[in-house]
Amino acid sequence: MIESTIYFIITIGILVFVHEFGHFIAARMCGMRTDAFAIGFGKRLFGWNKVTGFTWGDLDKDTDLQGHTDYKLCLLPLGGYVKIAGMVDESFDTEFVNKEPKPWEFRAKPTYQKLFVITAGVLMNLLLAVAIYWGINFFQGKRILETTKIGVVQDSSLAYQAGFRSFDKIISVNGTPVSDWENLLNTLLIKNIGKDVDVTVERNGEKITFTAPKKILSKATQKTMFLTIGDTKPMINAVFKNSPAEKAGLKSGDIFFELNKEKVLNTSQVINIITSHKKTEIPIRVIRKNDTILTEVNPGVEGKIGVALGDAYIGPIKYKDYGLGESLNKSFSNIGLYTVLTFKMFSSVIKGDAALADNIGGPVKIAKYAAKSADAGFVPFLSFLALLSLSLAIINILPFPVLDGGHFVIILIEGIVGRELPVKVKIAIQNIGFVILLLLMVFIVYTDISSL
């Protein structure tokens, strides 16, 4: 829980800073005053400005910042904001309404500058996503796992309910041949979202076609382990000190080949053999680089040998490198693909083909996936950050009150009619949007907790 909370704060902090910095720098470029740059909401914990310097707690109400910005950290780490002078926003500040517009205020600027400022946060989130994907594509390239064979399918799993069985080799999805693991998952879970999917597999030497229901696949999109990859062997990720495994000479990176003279294919098989042979010397054959090591281990009275296990992929792998320009083009392709898929998901939810609860995530789910991606390594965490940044950009540009897209529509209407909408109308729109957003947030948090 602590680890998830820390990664949640780091993830949200980065995304909010980037988004709000976009609004901030655009406002300053257009000559607008920014009264506050806040990370978080609610009570001011501490902050700095050119007038009072560094201070703890809230500023005095009659503090005159003389046009400078108060940079502050607030209590609730669920977002942030930039307070732009002369703008009706989520702070509901209307003290400026009865005064003549000042040249540094938002309301005094032309429509094109207002639109630029209000969309700058979304643009920065898009740029962050592009930059991350660009870097990953250039420095890491692409690692293609050339297999469509799945691993063990438990009887109680969603994969089993969808029709998959252990060690199926998937040949095609909705008539489209699949050749590698990424291609398989994208075709099955993303490109055909909201649809019943016909899957053709090779099972026990025979070709079998079955239909995976859209309701099951919709739930599967929220699971990190819907299908486990085949062509794997159980591997030792770590050996604990003074454990039976250490005494037997086992090392991190060893791959189990045989256990108790039985060939093993996955970690669950290893665990079952070890736990069922307490206080028994078990012969083990492991592969260590290019060597085969024979030894014995005794699980003791607890039925444990003191190792951390994982499944190591041993199938064919192809690597593809990208140049600087090709990496950038690939990053734009990634952005385009995820954007199209996001709107496909929205469409499926509206049509009733996919459940809303299965396709949205709030703070709890973000914390969970942030921690998991960070545990998997720096690159997976960056990929998760890029996807979240893109999602934030897409959601924020929707024409909904309170969001940037809602402000964009109001500014556009005001530009067309040549005058501002009454402040009371703006406040009413903001209030309605805020209440709906709050209710949606409560629902999202509830579904997050229910899915744990």
Image: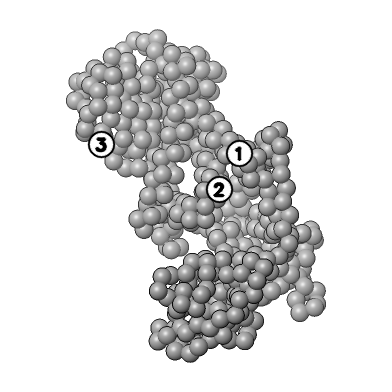
The CA span between labels 2 and 1 is: 10 Å
Q: What residue sits 68% from the left and 48% below the top?
A: 142
Horizontal side, residue 221 vs residue 179: left or right: left
The CA span between labels 3 and 2 is: 33 Å
The CA span between labels 1 and 3 is: 35 Å
Quarter of the picture holding the C terminus: bottom left
In the image, residue 17 lies at what x, y percent?
43, 34
Q: Nearer the viewer, residue 320 or 430?
A: 320
Element at label 2:
helix
Q: Is residue 341 visible?
A: yes
Q: Mark 2 packing: few (<14 Cα in 10 Å), some, or many (20+)?
A: some
Q: What residue is disc 3 on?
A: 45
Horizontal side, residue 8 vs residue 147: left or right: left
Residue 135, which numbered label?
Answer: 1
Q: Mark 3 packing: few (<14 Cα in 10 Å), some, or many (20+)?
A: some
Q: Residue type at mark 3?
A: Leu
Q: Residue type at mark 2?
A: Val
Element at label 1:
helix
Residue 379, which numbered label?
Answer: 2
Q: What residue sits 54% from the left and 17% below the top?
A: 112
Q: Which image quarter: residue 189?
A: bottom right
Element at label 3:
strand
Q: Residue type at mark 1?
A: Gly
In the image, residue 361 lies at what x, y percent?
48, 52
In the image, residue 376 lies at what x, y percent?
52, 55
Q: Mark 1 packing: few (<14 Cα in 10 Å), some, or many (20+)?
A: some
Horizontal side, residue 159 vs residue 145: left or right: left
Residue 257, which numbered label?
Answer: none
Q: Which image quarter: residue 10?
A: top left
Which of the marked residues, 2 or 1, is nearer the chain's N terminus? 1
Count up the numbered dots: 3
Q: Is residue 317 above or below residue 110?
A: below
